[in-house]
Image: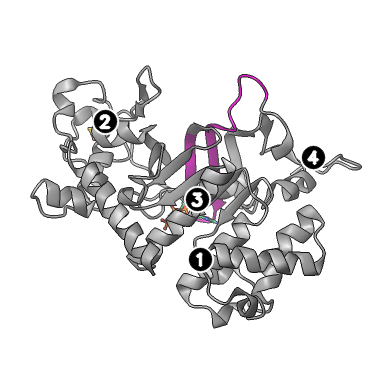
Amino acid sequence: MKKKSNEQIVDLKTQPIPEGHHLLEVDNLKMYFHTEDGVVHAVDGVSYTLDRGETLGVVGESGSGKSVTAKTLMGLIPMPPGKIEGGDALYRGQSLLSMSEEQMQSVRGNDIAMIFQDPMTSLNPVYKIGRQVGEGLRLHRGYTKEQAEQRAIELLDLVGIPEPEKRVKEYPHQFSGGMRQRVMIAMALACDPDILIADEPTTALDVTIQAQILEVMQEMQQKNGNAIIMITHDLGVVADMADKIMVMYAGRPVEFGTADEIFYNPRHPYTWGLIRSIPEQAIDEKQPLTPIPGNPPSLVNLPKGCPFAPRCVYAKPICHEQCPEHHTTETGHYSACHFADDLEFLKNAPDTSRSRKNNVAAVEEMNMVGGEE
Ligand SMILES: Nc1ncnc2c1ncn2[C@@H]1O[C@H](COP(=O)(O)OP(=O)(O)OP(=O)(O)O)[C@@H](O)[C@H]1O
Ligand code: SF4
Ligand SMILES: [Mg+2]
């Protein structure tokens, strides 16, 4: 990243969004890794927009490029081996990819904060929890040590950690997995970020804690009007909280639309597979849970044609020859399937007319259980 001397570092979240721009605009972003085994096409043409108060769900199987997309926005991909191969990402109209490292340090944590996938490796084992939670406030807001610790106590309380006065003085290994995840959320919330990126924040947690954690993030959003990017392999997790959903497969966005479009009018067979893997949906259709058969392709040697073709039960000869373009509707709902506009073909989609309501009810029930604890 370019370094500029005597650069004026700006708190970007206090700047107005220039007219004609969104809070975040990701446009045909490509990030490849150049490795000894070849070029890994980890992020290959990701595009979306996000506004304040909105939640974007990013869904896809393991290795589909969800985390690398988010880390690219945060300037956290080591280059090399990573290299931006095209596209851009604008935050409040400014390119995140061409910012100086100094400006990027101000953006990270302050304007855009990320809850990382693995809470243990993201917390420093040798520092007390209070110091780690308050670090951003000292760095970006000029808090004193005492002020930062006081705010850390409030934040731990906010995310539901009992006895926060005592817990700020403890170390990460003294916290359970669920509690560490909450610490990560407290750290991410500390500076009231404009965009909160939550990378699988609930994996490996039991459903009650999952519901509580999602609730904390939503409460913060209602209070601050920030945007959330929720990354998950489980479409069910974002069913009720996302406004927009991007489905990723093999580093590419294969479908993008509003949550209603993705659930009630999905246009890509991979999305259909994800929907059929949601337990509530399977129950509603009175069908057994159907995981998508097969494995995603290597991102080094992508098959010719549609990357999903080797696993797609609807594939036709053209699918193995030509890579599908995005077929976009007037509302911006796109699908990278040759047959996304073919009404006969779309009849193969799962019937989700009732299942999402069931899913909402199930999550509400979980929230009630969570709230009683
Ligand atoms: N530093 C790196 N060097 C080379 N390849 C990498 C590097 N980091 C990630 N990758 C590759 O980029 C691809 C996308 O990885 P990413 O972590 O974004 O997947 P993901 O969708 O977040 O998966 P998961 O659900 O398992 O977290 C994977 O094939 C991964 O192996
Ligand atoms: S383009 Fe062909 S292989 Fe790809 S998702 Fe559509 S039907 Fe399946
Ligand atoms: Mg990941």
Q: How far apart, in angstroms, are the residues tagged by discs 4 and 3? A: 28 Å
Q: How far apart, in angstroms, are the residues tagged by discs 2 and 1? A: 33 Å
Sequence-first tag of 1 and 3: 1
Q: How far apart, in angstroms, are the residues tagged by discs 2 and 3? A: 32 Å
Q: How far apart, in angstroms, are the residues tagged by discs 4 and 2? A: 42 Å
> Which is in the foreground here, disc 2 or disc 3?
3
Circle number at residue 173: none
Is residue 31 inside the magenta stretch?
A: yes
User: Image quadrant of ligand 2?
Assistant: top left
Q: Which residues are magenta?
A: 18-46
Q: Are marks 4 and 1 in contact (CB under 8 Å)?
A: no
Single out the residue that lies furthest toward the left. Answer: 286
The residue type indicated by label 4 comes to Val
Q: Check disc 2 and report the residue beneath it.
A: 267
Q: Is residue 116 left or right of residue 318?
A: right
Single out the residue that lies furthest toward the top. Answer: 330
Circle number at residue 219: 3
Q: How are the colours assigned in the image?
A: one colour
Q: Give residue 173's position: percent from left, percent from top.
A: 56, 81
Q: Give residue 230's position: percent from left, percent from top.
A: 46, 48
Sequence-first tag of 4 and 3: 4
The residue type indicated by label 2 comes to Arg
Q: Is residue 114 left or right of residue 306?
A: right
Q: Is mark 4 within 8 Å of ligand 1?
A: no
Q: Is residue 131 left or right of residue 27?
A: right
Q: Check disc 4 and report the residue beneath it.
A: 10
Identify the residue at image location x=38%, y=21%.
Answer: 331
Q: How far apart, in angstroms, are the residues tagged by discs 4 and 1? A: 30 Å
In terms of depth relative to the viewer, which is nearer, 127 or 335?
127
Helix, strand or loop under label 3? helix
Q: Check disc 1 and report the residue beneath it.
A: 118
Is residue 159 inside the magenta stretch?
A: no
